[in-house]
Amino acid sequence: MDFKLPIAWLQLIRQRLRMLTALAGITFIIVLMFIQIGFRNALYSSATQVHRSLRGDLFILSAQYKSLTSNQSFSRSRLYQVGGLPDVESITPLYTQFAKLKNPVNGQKYSIYVIGFEPVTSVFEIDAVEASLEKLKLPDVVLFDENSRPEFGPIADWYHAGDRVPTFEVYAFVAPLGYKVRVGGLFNLGPSFGVDGNLITSTSTFLRIFQPVGRSSDLIDIGVIRLKETANHRQVAQQIREMLAKDVQVFTRDEFIRLEKDYWAQRTPIGFTMNLMLTMGSIIAIIIVYQILYSNVSNHLKAFATLKAIGYTDSYLLGVVFRQALILAFLGYIPGLLIALWLYSLARKATNLPMILSTEQGLLMLTSTILVCTLSGLLTANKLRLVDPTDVF
């Protein structure tokens, strides 16, 4: 009885308009899920881009540290306490704080994130920063993030065109007067959900910018520690935890990144909202696909009853439903993927956020689509089990 008649496909294409409507619904759900996953990944990726670009193995932070955007400083002496350990190769104090950059075209001020370090060796794994170390040693020179949002003006365009970039003013918050700086180079980091743009400068220039608010060189925000190649990162981290006071905490690179992700995922409204939207989107996807499959089974109930009457088993008929679910999943996934790629490109250009669809994410979404359709098919299968040919005819 189990000859190779493509019943699942024939039932779907028998009513082409209904099939196209079903595919449109599944495609919409796939696009929705792609966008939600894209923005959630962009949230985590952009929030940790500074962490991932730092050239360090261990990081010392204040015990009050919550996230990179919430300023929490600690004594620089804590970092120097670990400099003599045999497994430590180098230590670098890092200063971070928000300021306001005055747009050189329209005079409007916008919040920008300023990072300062001693430009002896680069603390960033960014080639453009390393190439500009000599320029950073000059007073009042900054590097401008060319991926910053456009509110700061055409600073990067002027620099690329070879024009003389005018000096612009950076204001420490609540300071009535700005500090004039000039661009010595560009780098590529990009904004996040909490940061619109970035400046990198030397420690001396950083302290001059924030002198009006009493910023001291003795208070740093991140202590970056590089270990020797033979060092065990976790063991050294535990050793430093035991030797330092409880006003600081020590993290490996992975722990530092995970700390930031957890903050945005669990302690901010936007992280909670995105996770909730993703969960609700998955539930809605199951409901929509279930309705599509249930409607298809209902419309072909007599056909299924006939097949059952002539000897086809329940397992065969259930296989038909599952094959229909897989066909809809694959056919809906392809246009959904193409539309999502287009929307990712639009969002990336509009926000400068890292809206990137990786191969792994694409495959994960395909697997999720198949699972959603399979689960919906499983829920629909109950109707077939209860089909009695005598009741239908």
Image (cartoon, rainbow, N blue to C red):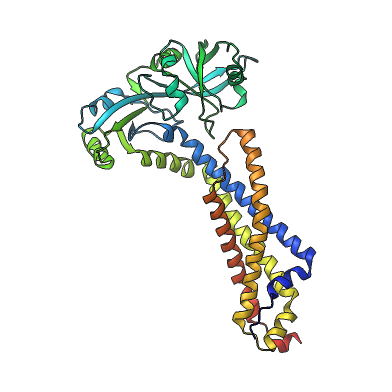
Tell me what residue is drawn at x 27 percent, y 36 percent: 229
- Going 48% across and 36% down the picture, which residue do you hit? 47
Q: Is residue 21 left or right of residue 364?
A: right
Q: Position of residue 1 (x, y in %)?
A: 65, 86
Which of the 4 quarters of the picture holds residue 9?
bottom right
Q: Is residue 135 in view?
A: yes
Observer-nearest of 221 and 267: 221
Is residue 37 found left or right of 87 in the rendered image? right
Nearer to us in this view, 131 or 11: 131
Residue at 36% over, 33% down: 64
Q: List x then y, in percent, for residue 141.
A: 47, 13
- The foreground one among 111 and 139 is 139
Quarter in which the C terminus is drawn? bottom right
At x 27%, y 38%, the residue is 237
User: Percent x, y for residue 15?
Assistant: 79, 68
Q: Is residue 67 above or below residue 290?
A: above
Residue 67 in view in this figure: no
Instruction: State whether residue 232 is above or below residue 188.
Output: below
The image shows residue 269 at horizontal and vertical percentages of 53, 41
Q: Quadrant of residue 103?
A: top right
